[in-house]
Image (tube, rainbow, N blue to C red):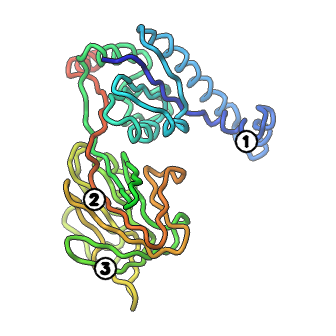
Amino acid sequence: MFERIVLVTRKTRLEGLIERFNTRAQAKFYIEHSGGNFLQYQEEHDVYSEALSRLRKELCLGLKTLVTDVSLIPNVLFSKKDLIVTVGQDGLVANTAKYVGEQPIVAINPDPIRFDGILLPFGVSEGRRAVSAVIEEKAAEKKVTLAEAQLKDGQRLLAFNDLYVGVRSHTSARYRLQWRGKKEQQSSSGLIISTGAGSTGWLSSVVNMTQGMAAFLGHKPKNKLQFNLEWDSPKLVFVVREPFASRHSEANIVAGVIEEGTTLSLESNIPSGGCIFSDGIQADFLDFNAGTIAQIGVADHRARLVVPSAYEQRESYNE
């Protein structure tokens, strides 16, 4: 079934600093002059490099291997014969899943001490076993619903966690919202459209703010406000951030659940700087300037994350 392993990596913080300051010595001087501990950057880099080197040796399974930085992923042509392996933080998984279609993703945590690894079920020592299970069609998987923004000219953008629609600078955005037969002119600091996987992230911060304001104003709900969406739930949740009611804008439609097969329609009235970006990456965006109409809905395919089988989970527990 598979002919190639695509190993997706990400530059370490140290590599980013060296790119910025040209040399390691200059990067060291900058960090220490700012009161930081350069040794932490070096240790993090060394752990990641050693993990990547070990993994590359472990994955010598007779398949071709392509090693690519996540920044180049939008330019890679993926096929149904590719098996994806990510090595890095949780965000690396989210920003890879948007481009690989329905190809299985084995997510490796190269540094469990530093990375939480909510989306990283495998350590480096488990990488070969996980990839072999996929090749042998014995792997367990978890499907993840993706969000999609589509423009009338055919451009589209997927999101693993969430989409943001508004002004790049997060200042006031003006647009017309159409939802369940109702239309409303709005002015806000933008909308967040969240998947089940992202519902504990950016969306939860808006919920926390709402609950905190309600308590401040003396309205205490009986239960804690939260959205309980499973990762594979065929639904999205949208919220309007800081909607402003005026003579020219309304604030009646501020949240909703987008079911599969339905869409939220947004028409931009933003002269310039309007954008739609996904998963917190502003470089990954669509222009959303005046006249642009975006349809937001559930994507027609799911991301496939490889997870430990029930047997492997028992073995890990026993260890």
Around disc 2, counting alpha carbons within 10 Å, would you say few (fewer than 14), some (14 to 19), or many (20 or more)? Answer: many
Q: Is residue 238 above or below residue 147?
A: below
Is residue 263 visible in the rendered image? The answer is: yes
Q: Is residue 262 above or below residue 301?
A: below
Q: Which residue lies at the image location 38% right of the left edge and 84% below the top edge? A: 249
Is residue 199 visible in the rendered image? The answer is: no
Q: Which residue lies at the image location 36% right of the left edge and 76% below the top edge? A: 176
Give whichever of discs 2 and 3 has the lower sequence position. 3
Amino acid beneath label 3: Glu
Residue that numbered label 1 is attached to = 20
Contact between labelled residues 3 and 1, with CB atoms less than 8 Å apart: no
Give whichever of discs 2 and 1 has the lower sequence position. 1
Residue that numbered label 3 is attached to = 184
Q: Nearer the viewer, mark 2 or mark 3?
A: 3
How far is mark 2 from mark 1, CA to CA?
Answer: 38 Å
Q: Is residue 22 above or below residue 125?
A: below
Q: Secondary structure at mark 2?
A: strand
Q: Is residue 295 above or below residue 233?
A: below
- For residue 73, side relative to residue 254 (left or right): right
Residue that numbered label 2 is attached to = 237
Q: Position of residue 135 (x, y in %)?
A: 31, 15
265, 49: nearer the viewer: 265
Amino acid beneath label 2: Val
Give whichever of discs 1 and 3 has the lower sequence position. 1
294, 169: nearer the viewer: 294
